[in-house]
Image (tube, helix red, strand yellow):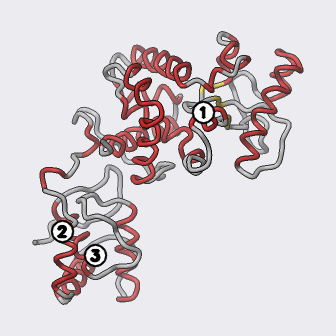
Amino acid sequence: MLRTRDLKYQFPLMRGEDVRAVQQALIAVRAVPPCGVADGIFGQSTQLSVRGFQEPRRLAVDGVVGNDTWTALFEASAAAPGTQIQAASSELPPAEAAPQQAQISPQFPIPPTAAPPPLNRDQARRAKQWIMRNFGPAVTAAATAPFDADLVCAIVCKETANVWLGWTDRMSAEDVLARCVFDASGDFPGTSRRAFPQNTAAFRARFGNDLTEDLIAEANRARALRKLPPAEWVYKGYGIFQYDLQHITTDEAFFRDKLWRDMGQCLDRLFHELRQKLADAHGDLPDAIRRYNGSGDKAQEYMAHVLLLRSWCAEQS
């Protein structure tokens, strides 16, 4: 195969038969760390494997398959024993099975972003598998076009899965939901918050000691799982989608009655917000996702991450 471009880890992810050929060669030469299955998608695992191949060969250790790395890699793989080449080839799925970018309509391209998302591809697929195994019927019933189950899972991956994915081997699904209480912004040193409540003192002044102490206790239960010491802070994000505490002024029951422990209640709030944002965005789904997070650069990054995570979730049937 002729080299037609430099291959590297970027967003949107590079895909194609040249990527698959590089991955096959990495498998054949037993690059460390391994790149995984040759799926034709240049993700973080492939980048790290390329770097591992480059380092001992005095190549630029940048994870980019340029001309020098391409030549060295295929020369090395050509010298590998035939059994290794066959093993590498056996891991290749049929070409038509390679997932297309995002499994999303081409009208929703994934914008580039400097920062990687909170989960890698394999973690996102594991998170979707857990969500659908435990809450699949509720998610499927709630999801209506253009908001599909993969988008639901992607938002979970962006919001909370990086924390609870490590809990699923020792906690029930119900306990995972109950402990999704995160975000101390406004009280944590160096942070600020514009929406109500700006901090725990503002919340206490409006809602009194009983509810304040109750929510502090919920935050500390989640902190304990993360091996953090107790703090006298009311947290701002509740539930697997991180419904914001600012909504307590119109939806007090959700917080007072701990409705974030119910996936159906969480889905109701998620889709209510998404539908509002879609209307504000005049039907533009990526812009609705951005608006769901807010405005500015962080909201733009949020949208890019969710679309990328959605593409990975779509690969998990």
Q: Quadrant of the C terminus?
A: top left
Q: Judging from the image, what secondary structure is the residue with disc 2 in?
A: helix
Quarter of the image for residue 263 reads top right
Instruction: Report which quarter residue 109 is drawn in.
Output: top left
Residue on which disc 2 sits? 90
- What percent of the width, then of the height, locates residue 169? 56, 50
Q: Nearer the viewer, mark 1 or mark 2?
A: 1
Q: Residue furthest left?
A: 1
Residue 174's disc number:
1
Residue 12: image x %, image y %?
Answer: 32, 49
- Mark 3 closeness class: few <14, some 14–19, many ≥20 residues within 10 Å: many
Q: Which of marks 1 and 2 is nearer the N terminus?
A: 2
Earlier in the chain: of badge 1 and badge 3, it is 3
Q: Looking at the picture, which amino acid does disc 1 mark?
A: Glu
Read off the residue under disc 3.
26
- Residue projecting furthest to the right: 209
Residue kind at label 2, given as amino acid type: Ser
